[in-house]
Amino acid sequence: MGDGLLTIDGDCHRRSRMIMLPAFHREHIAASVEVIEAETTSALERMTPGATIDLYAWTRRLALRVAMRALFGLDPDGERARAIDAAALFERALAFYASEYILRVFRGRLSPWARMQAAARRLDELVYSEISDRRASGRRGQDILSLLLDAEDEDGNRLSDLQIRDEVMTLMFAGHDTTTSTISFMFYELARRPDIAARLQAEQDAQPHGGRPLASQLLSGELAELEMVLEETLRKYPPAWVGPRRAREAFEFAGHAVPARAFVNYSSWASHHLPDVFADPQEFRPERFAAAARAALPKGAYVPFGGGSRTCIGMRFGQLEVRTIASLLLARFTLTLPDDFQLSIRQMPTISPRDGLPMRIHARAAAPPAAVRAAA
C-alpha cells in the first residue's frame, strides 16, 4: 500500500488527513447511497434462489466496485478496469500476510512476497493510468482522486503521482476489505440466529416504503435492530483487529514498564472479548448495544474503528455501505449455512473467513402491504 494514510505518522499523517477530510463530509457520503444501492441491486439480481454462493467472494467484488465508483470515480466496467480483476489481485496480494511466517522472508520468484509484488504491479497499472488520464484531460468529479490531484499544502506544493497512488491504494484496500469482512461475519451470525434475522426483516417491513430503508435512515442509523446487529458484528469480529502504535512517553501497564517510543500494539479483538466488559463474549448478542447498555460501556472498550486522531477516516462511509448492502440483501433473500460448515478465521491485515463463506440462497416471501399490517 505504500505510504498512505494507514501507514504514515506524525505531521505527514496530519497533513494527509486534513487534505482528505472534505471527501468524507456527510454530504459527500450521502451522495454515495445511490452508487451503493445501484451496485448492490445489480449484484442481487444475479443471485439465484436454490444456488450456493461464496458470500465472502461475492461481497468483495461488490465492495470493490463500490469503492472504485464512489471513492475514486473509476468505472469498474470500463475497458481498463475489465482487463484487471482488481478483487482477485487484492486477495492475492493480501494472501502474503496469511502465509507461513517463515516464508515471508524469502524474495524468490515463487515466494509469497513475489506474488504480492506482482499483484501490486497490476493494480498500479490501473491506478497510474487513471491518474495520467485525469491530469491530461483535467477531468474531475466528487471523488477522492479528484481531490488529491488538486490538493496543495500551505506552500503551494502538490502531491506527486507516487503519493497519490499510495493514498488511492490504501483507501481502495480499506474501502472494500473491511466491508467484505463485516458483511460476511454478519450473515454468518444471522444464519445461526434466524430469530435475529427475522427481527431485522420485520423492522424493514414496518417501514412505509416497501421494506427498503430510506437513505436518511441508513445515514442516521435510525433502524435500531440493524444498528445493534452491525455494532455487535463489529464487536465480535473487528475487521482491523490489531493496531500498531508507539508510546509517546514512558508508562506502566499491569506491572510492566513501557519505555517512551516503544512500539505498542493494541488489539480490539482482545479487548472486545474481555468477559468483565462483555459477558459471555463469544455469544452474539445485539442487545449489548441497546442505547442504555451502549452508554454504560467504559471509554475505549469498544473501538472497531480505532480512536483518537487515527480514528478511521472512512468510518461513516463503511457503516453506510454495510447498512445498505445488508438491508437490500435481507429484503430479498434469506441465507443459510451448509450443515457441515465450520468457520475458520484468517488474520491478514483484516480478519476474514479462511475458507470463504458458502451460503445457500432462499427467496424471501413478500412482506404484507403496509395497510394490511396497520389493520392487523
Image (cartoon, grey):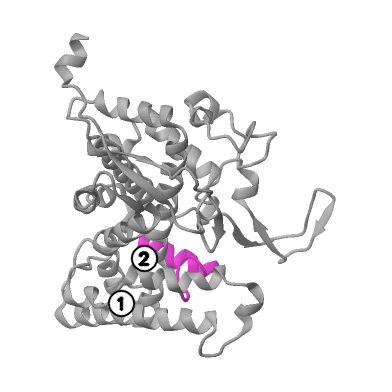
- Crowdedness near tag 2: few (<14), some (14–19) or many (≥20) residues, C-alpha within 10 Å: many
Position of residue 321 in the picture relative to residue 46 (left or right): right
As drawn, is 186 to the left or to the right of 295? left
Q: Residue furthest top?
A: 375
Judge whether residue 218 is colored magenta. Answer: no
The residue under the point 26% across, 41% down is: 328
- Mark pair 1, 2: CA separation: 10 Å
The answer to whether residue 314 shows anywhere in this view is no
Q: Residue furthest right?
A: 255
Q: Position of residue 155 (x, y in %)?
A: 37, 76
Q: How far from the left and from the top, in percent, is residue 61?
A: 31, 61
Q: Is residue 224 above or below residue 141?
A: above
Residues at marks 1 and 2 touching, judged by CB atoms closer than 8 Å? yes
- Image quarter where the N terminus lies is bottom left
Q: Amino acid at mark 1?
A: Val
Residue 192 visible in the picture? yes
Q: Considering depth in this image, is 246 or 203 the residue closer to the camera?
A: 203
Tell me, for residue 127, which label it has, or none.
1
The residue type indicated by label 2 comes to: Met
Q: Which residues are magenta?
A: 1-22
Residue 207 at x, y percent in the picture: 23, 26
For residue 202, above or below residue 374: below
Residue 5 in the magenta stretch? The answer is yes
Choose the circle earlier in sequence order: 1 or 2. 1
Please state which of residues 158 and 264 is positioned toward the viewer in this rendering: 264
Element under label 1?
Answer: helix
Q: In the image, what residue occupies the spot 35% across and 41% down?
A: 335
Q: Residue drawn 46% across and 32% down?
A: 193
Whole-percent x, y for residue 12 in the image? 49, 71
Quadrant of residue 274 in the image?
top right
Q: Secondary structure at mark 2?
A: helix
- Mark 2 highlights which residue? 172
